[in-house]
Image (tube, rainbow, N blue to C red):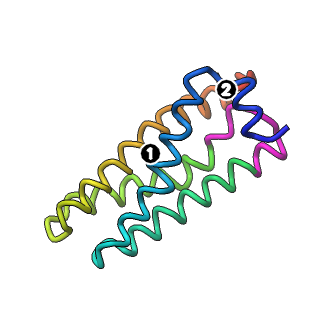
Amino acid sequence: MTLSEAMTQFGPSWLSIWLPILMLGAFALPLALLIWKSTRVTALICVAASLLGGIGVNYLYVNMGYVKLLGLPHLVVWTPLVIFLWFKIKNPAIEKAARVVMSVVLATIVISLAFDYVDVARYVMGDRTPPA
């Protein structure tokens, strides 16, 4: 069973709505930052972090199954990204439209991290039930 199939079968019904939003906000939307010279490196950092997080989640799934610990790779790569984006958004030298794009990316990642932090904490505290 693939990770996608496991999420569909065992995950909550709202997950089928959230995952496309997450893919758009964390994987596709950062590519828009390539438009502005001042945010091209930021775009690459965002995409690289999301790819690393996705690879990490898939690796854990293959080795551990559908467990609450699957959010750990997101914590590792997206927590520093959140801090990085926060400071980039505050930079008035960055174009306003780019700051809006970064804000949407940041909001998407923060929402995902909220779920991930809860799931990982529950796993660490001994809750080995599948994420819900």
Looking at the image, residue 40 sits to the left or right of residue 47; the answer is: left
Badge 2: how crowded within 10 Å, few (<14), some, or many (20+)?
many
Picture layout, residue 116 above or below residue 109? above
Q: Which quarter of the rendered picture does the N terminus lie within?
A: top right
| Quadrant hosting residue 101 | bottom left
Looking at the image, residue 130 sits to the left or right of residue 91; the answer is: right
Marker disc for residue 61: none
Q: Nearer the viewer, residue 117 or 7?
A: 7
Which comes before the other along the chain, label 1 or label 2? Answer: 1
Query: Residue 23 location in percent, x, y?
Result: 53, 47
Q: Which quarter of the rendered picture does the C terminus lie within?
A: top right
Picture layout, residue 39 above or below residue 1? below
Question: Which type of secondary structure does the marked residue at label 2 adopt?
Answer: loop
Query: Residue 65 location in percent, x, y?
Result: 81, 37
Q: Nearer the viewer, residue 101 or 119?
A: 101
Query: Residue 66 location in percent, x, y?
Result: 76, 33
Picture layout, residue 33 above or below residue 104? below
Is 63 covered by the magenta stretch?
Answer: yes
Is 62 covered by the magenta stretch?
Answer: yes
Identity of the residue furthest to the bottom in this view:
37
Residue beneath the point at 50% across and 43% down: 22
Residue beneath the point at 40% across and 75% down: 41
Residue type at tag 2: Pro
Identity of the residue furthest to the left in this view:
92
Point out the stretch of residues depicted in magenta: 59-71
Q: Which residue is mark 2?
A: 131
Residue beneath the point at 44% across and 45% down: 109
Question: Which type of secondary structure does the marked residue at label 1 adopt?
Answer: helix
What secondary structure is the magenta-colored segment mainly? helix
Q: Which residue is mark 1?
A: 109
Residue type at tag 1: Ile
